[in-house]
Image (tube, rainbow, N blue to C red):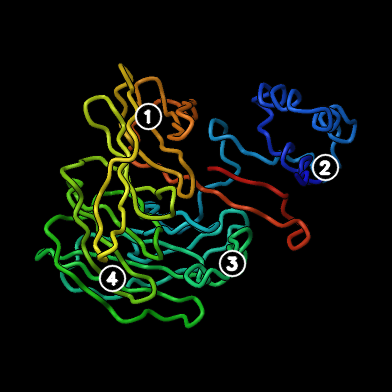
């Protein structure tokens, strides 16, 4: 069996959170080469460029200041691929913000008569064709913004903006029975998904075909959060009778789909309220009287990450920076 190069092992071990030394103790017991790496002076005293922490814990103050938007009423709609999408209510326009540099790009919202509720998503323009690893695409890379709104007749309209053409595309629409839930979107199966109120259905926007459709869920799951399934498909989590249930959409041979309950986690007296998820991970955020916790659905480990508060929705911000390309900004992996 081919062994992993020691320099690669060292890079992995350097990413272990410093406030969880128990992990390093376990790693040291794996084998002698790994124990030698952990006790090496170069590992214990890293290079000067490594003095800045590689991780920013969610329990500490964020390294980013709120953006200067010129208005006092704004709403963060989405975070993805190093970018944050903000809706400024006062000026009724969108801002694509890159927190690590402070760069902003302002977009006018396309006119939609009768619309009274907005939601949106931002993503790397190269995601659909798989031409980007998303490690640093937010720094000057092209992006796509999708905005969806609904009118009083329950007609949802969607349009996509491309930073490459600097223009909005054609509008597509579909009728829905329920309004939007104030939840972040999910990127899965080359499509964006938005939760509708009551948890009875999900709005799907096909990124390649630019089409809208509605996906029914297996029941009423008020307060649910969508998340990516292990196979990269669509899934969601919901709390029912003191348990967290994970449902995934499975594709059948006939071209149809069905929902299957994938996992259930008993919470006992925890009685949580779901307030967010970290896309691309198994982590969901839970709000309780004691504070905000993150639950890993795979390992079932729970960790407190924030103080108590009246939170309804959390948007985790994750980003990577390449030091050789951006020498003025530290190399960091941020989780905000």
Q: Earlier in the sequence, mark 1 or mark 4?
A: 4
Q: Position of residue 332 (x, y in %)?
A: 68, 47
| Label 4 vs label 3, nearer the camera | 3
Q: Earlier in the sequence, mark 2 or mark 4?
A: 2
**Apparent side of residue 32 relative to residue 112 in the rendered image (left or right):** right
Whole-angstrom CA distance, mark 1 to mark 2, is 44 Å
**Which residue is identified by label 3?**
132
Q: Earlier in the sequence, mark 4 or mark 3?
A: 3
**Which residue is identified by label 4?**
158
**Which residue is identified by label 1?**
309
Q: Position of residue 111 (x, y in %)?
A: 26, 75
Q: Are marks 3 and 1 in contact (CB under 8 Å)?
A: no
Whole-angstrom CA distance, mark 4 to mark 3, is 25 Å
Depicted 315 relative to depicted 213: above or below: above
Whole-angstrom CA distance, mark 1 to mark 4, is 33 Å
**Which residue is identified by label 2?**
6
| Label 1 vs label 4, nearer the camera | 4
Determine which quarter of the picture holds residue 209.
bottom left
């Amino acid at each position: 069996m081919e062994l992993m190069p020691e320099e690669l092992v060292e890079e992995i071990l350097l990413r272990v959170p410093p406030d969880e030394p128990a992990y390093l103790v376990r790693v040291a017991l794996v084998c002698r080469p790994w124990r030698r790496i952990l006790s090496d002076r170069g590992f214990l005293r890293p290079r000067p460029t490594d003095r800045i922490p590689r991780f920013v814990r969610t329990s500490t103050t964020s390294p980013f200041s709120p953006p200067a938007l010129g208005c006092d009423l704004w709403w963060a709609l989405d975070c993805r691929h190093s970018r944050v999408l903000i809706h400024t209510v006062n000026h009724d326009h969108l801002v694509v913000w890159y927190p690590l540099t402070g760069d902003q790009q302002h977009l006018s919202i396309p006119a939609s008569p009768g619309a009274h509720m907005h939601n949106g998503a931002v993503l790397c323009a190269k995601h659909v064709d798989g031409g980007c690893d998303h490690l640093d695409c937010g720094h000057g890379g092209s992006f796509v913004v999708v905005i969806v709104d609904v009118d009083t007749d329950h007609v949802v309209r969607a349009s996509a903006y491309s930073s490459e053409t600097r223009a909005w595309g054609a509008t597509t629409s579909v009728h829905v029975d329920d309004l939007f839930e104030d939840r972040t979107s999910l990127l899965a199966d080359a499509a964006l998904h938005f939760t509708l109120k009551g948890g009875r259905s999900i709005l799907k926007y096909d990124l390649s075909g630019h089409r809208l459709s509605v996906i029914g869920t297996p029941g009423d799951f008020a307060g649910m959060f969508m998340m990516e399934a292990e196979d990269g498909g669509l899934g969601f989590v919901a709390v029912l009778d003191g348990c967290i249930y994970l449902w995934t959409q499975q594709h059948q041979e006939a071209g149809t789909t069905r929902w299957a309950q994938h996992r259930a986690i008993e919470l006992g007296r925890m009685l949580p309220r779901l307030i967010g998820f970290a896309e691309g991970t198994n982590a969901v955020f839970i709000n309780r009287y004691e504070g905000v916790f993150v639950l890993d659905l795979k390992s079932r480990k729970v960790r407190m990450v924030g103080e108590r508060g009246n939170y309804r929705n959390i948007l985790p911000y994750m980003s990577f920076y390449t030091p050789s390309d951006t020498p003025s900004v530290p190399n960091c992996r941020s989780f905000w």
